[in-house]
Amino acid sequence: QVRLVESGGGTVQTGGSLRLSCAAPGRTLSTYTMGWFRQAPGKEREFVGLIRWTGDVTYYTDSVKGRFTMSRDNSESTVFLQMNSLKSEDTAVYYCAARPYGGSRSITESHYDYWGQGTQVTVSS
């Protein structure tokens, strides 16, 4: 079992930035492909991006390309989602997820075995 804990959410104005973190207390995430998903009110949860367990491959949904960047620090067992140029449509609860040795096309919820509890991101105009 892998417990994931997200942090870094909050309220920011349009055009601002936030950095989300996802940690796994007490264990390493170095062999897990990590994904970020989000769920806006009244909508289904959607894929945002992933970083492969090797650290050399990232993949993002079109709506965040060029604005969001994922990175990982395996020594700290933490994965980050840097979000820049935030828009009101980015408002959602953001979840991180983990899949052991996941491939670079792990873009659906069913690909992931472990989930965090979510962190709220609100972008106000």
Image (cartoon, helix red, strand yellow):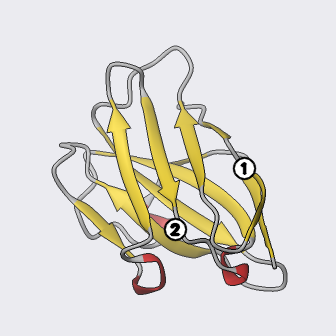
- Judge whether residue 113 can be spotted in this image: no
Q: Quadrant of residue 120?
A: bottom right
Near mark 2 (Cα within 10 A), the count class, few <14, some 14-19 or many ≥20, is some
Is 71 situated left or right of 125 in this image? left
Which numbered marker is on residue 9?
1
Q: Furthest-top residue in view?
A: 26
Q: Quadrant of residue 22?
A: top right
Q: Which mark is residue 109?
A: 2
Residue 97 x/y as whole percent: 51, 51
Which residue appears at 34% of the width and 66% of the height? 106
Q: Say what amino acid the circle numbered 2 marks.
A: Glu
Asked if residue 16 is positioned above or below residue 6 in the image, the reply reads: below
SS class of the residue under badge 2? Answer: helix
Q: Nearer the viewer, residue 91 or 6?
A: 91
Q: Residue at x 74, y 73 (%)?
A: 91
* Label 1: which secondary element: loop
Q: Residue at x 65, y 79 (%)?
A: 87
Q: What x and y, as percent, mark residue 112?
A: 46, 56
Mark 1 or mark 2, which has the lower sequence index? 1
- Give the vertical position of 82 relative to 39 (above or below): above
Q: Label 1 sits on what residue type?
A: Gly
**Disc 1 and disc 2 in contact, CB within 8 angstroms:** no
Which residue is at the front of the view, 66 or 76?
Answer: 66
16 lies above or below 73: below
| Label 1: few (<14), some (14–19) or many (≥20) C-alpha neighbours in 10 Å | some
The x and y percentages for residue 43 are 75, 85
